[in-house]
Every structure is written in C-alpha cells, then in structure tokens.
Amino acid sequence: MRKLYIDNIRWITVVLVVIYHVIYMFNSVETAGVIGPFYEIQYQDVFQYIVYPWFMLLLFTISGMSARYYLNTHTDREFVHSRTTKLLVPSTIGLVVFHWILGYYNMAIAGVIAQMSAVPKPVLAIIMMCSGIGPLWYIQVLWVLSIVLVLVRKLEKDRFYQICSKANAGILLALTILVIVSARILNAPVIVLYRFGIYGTGFLIGYFCLSHDEVVDRLAKYWHILVVISVALAVAFISINFGRPYAEHSVLDTPLCNIYAWIMTLTVIAFMRKWGNFENPFSKWMIRQSWGLYIFHYIPLAASAYYLHLYAQELPPVLVYIFVAIAAFAGAYLLNAIISRIPFLRWAVLGITRRTK
C-alpha cells in the first residue's frame, strides 16, 4: 500500500529543487558554473539558504523509508534489480545517450567550450558527459546506498529494525548528534554534493526507524512544536550565514546547519503525516510526473538561461526568472512525455522498462 504523504513529500520536494535551481542559476554566492547574479546583493537568494541544508537529506530519508516498504513485499535480489534499472542505468547509460546535452550547456555557461578546441573529440565527449551529471548525482548516491543496505540486511536480519520500532520523538531528535557527526565523514573530495555520510545516515534512519508507521505517528503528535523550532533554526541559520557559501563544507559541516537540516527533515515528515496524507487529481498527476521532472528539469533550465543571457540581457530579472522557471517545468514535462514513449530511451534515460499510464 502506497503512503500518500510520502508521495506528496517527494513531488513537493522535487518542485522545491526546481525552484532552487532557477534561483541558483542567477545567484550571487555560489557562482561557479552558473550565469551569475543580476545584482551584488540579491535577497531572493535567501530561498537557497532556507532549503539547501535539508531538502536532499529529506529525499534520502524518505528513500530509505520507501526502500523498506518495497522490501516488505520483494526479495533483496528484486530490490537490487529494481534499483539498478531505476537508478544506475539513467545515471550511467543515460549520460551517454542523453545527458551530455546538459554537459554542453554547463560548459557553454562556464565559457570553456572555446578553450577546448584542441582537445581530442573523444576526450571532449567524455568531459561533456561528466559535466552533464547535474541532478543525477542523487540517484548515483542512492544506488550505492541501496547496495550497502542489502549487505546490511544480510548481517542485521531485521533484529535492529524491530528494536527501532520503539523509537519515539525524543530518540529521533537525539539522532541529531549522529547527523552532525556523519556530516563530517565519507565526503567525496572536491565534489561537495557526494556527501555519503549524512545522506547515508538519513537513508538508514528512514529505513530502520521512520518506516514504522507507529514511529511516525508518535513524531506527528509534535508537528506544531517542530514547526516552531524549524522556523527559529531557519532564521538563525540565515542570519548567521547569509552571504557565505552555503553549499561548501565551511557552512555545511557546522552544527547549526546540520541541526537545522535534521529537525526540518523531521518537521516535514511529521507535518505531512498529519496533514499531507491525501490525494486529488493534481497531486496524483504531480506524483506521476515527479521522477521525470527531477531527471529532466535542468536541461531546459540551463538552455533557456544560457540563451536569454546571450540574446536578451536587457530583460528585467523578474521576467528572466519567470521564463527560466516556465522552461524548466514545461520542458521537463515535455521531455518526459516524449522520451517515455520511446522504449530504449525510456529505459536508458528514465530507468523505466514499461510505460505507465
């Protein structure tokens, strides 16, 4: 049985990711590989500080919960096959056959294509494919964590899982300490996105603790208190860090950042368990579209931002944001509709073997 509140968390978070990337493309703080700011100080950049610390941790946490729900009715072998098709194929083969397009635009935005005229074409193709990873880093990390989970299950044999069913809100809050510590370990060098420590921790907490309905129900009783705490933490985090590089370890590894990240993750899960366990025609459509929206949105976003910067520099910033946002959402939905109808591309780019209605 599907958990509607989990599905709703997923599509809403993906929408936040798209909005974040629209603002990120023109932000004034993390300026590598983006168009760059309209002004020296941009208060719309506050949105990045509000969501960046927690929205991917939230996705990994509910991915851990979803892994448990799947494994309740499937074997480990079926789980590995499913996750390899859905996650590994798009993030490897999909790079070769499609996402090199994003690599081209990322390199064009960075202004490096002209500098690589002497680079052999096969090498340039590899560089372009690597530059096209973009949002696919999430599913690469998620595949690795899924494989690790299977190994953990062989050792754990549900003993620890049963113990975790007794967790209450206090224990979940105490896990903040584990999140703070994990944020400092298993981080990939140079590429800050690959934070295996903290994302693995969220994934495993989701699997072992939050996949128990009774645990989430205990947490949901305190949703209103968690909202107040999260707002206070958000204000503190923004006040202290606005203008600092929020996506680098100098900020990401601080206790405040990780306290905010974990409490906000718990807050969203508790709030949505209480108020988000519903469906309507719009939410059902967004649930169906969320995977394609995540996979595809950055290509039309980057392309539209690049061409607007090249040919329409006189446009007011508000119109640029609007046009790029429309391109990101509409372009993603269009690409999803087209590619989901082509069997090979549907498998290679979306990791889906059969088209769903």
Image (spheres, helix red, strand yellow):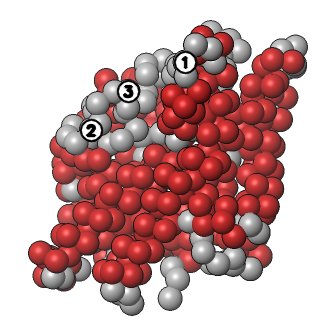
Asked if one can make out residue 272 in the rendered structure from this viewpoint, the answer is no
Label 2: element kind: loop
Compared with 6, 264 (above or below) is above
Q: From the image, tell me which residue sits under label 1.
A: 119
Compared with 186, 272 (above or below) is below
Quarter occupied by residue 211? bottom left
Image coordinates of residue 12 in percent, x first then y, are 61, 58
Image coordinates of residue 340 in percent, x first then y, are 72, 66
Image coordinates of residue 94 in percent, x first then y, are 57, 53
Q: From the image, tell me which residue sits under label 2.
A: 187
Discs 2, 3 touching: Cβ within 8 Å = no
For the point 60% across and 66% down, which residue is it?
347
Q: From the image, tell me which residue sits under label 3.
A: 248
Type of amino acid under label 3: Glu
Type of amino acid under label 1: Val
Type of amino acid under label 2: Asn
Which circle's residue, 3 or 1, is located before the other in the chain?
A: 1
Q: Residues within 10 Å of mark 2 (few under 14, many from 20)?
A: some
Q: CA distance from mark 3 to mark 1?
A: 30 Å
Q: Nearer the viewer, mark 2 or mark 1?
A: 1
Which circle's residue, 2 or 3, is located before the other in the chain?
A: 2
Say which of 305 and 281 sits in front. 305
For the point 64% across and 78% down, which residue is it?
354
Image coordinates of residue 304 in percent, x first then y, are 78, 33
Say which of 137 and 247 sits in front. 137
Q: CA distance from mark 2 to mark 1?
A: 31 Å
Q: Nearer the viewer, mark 2 or mark 3?
A: 2
For the point 43% across and 69% down, which residue is it?
83
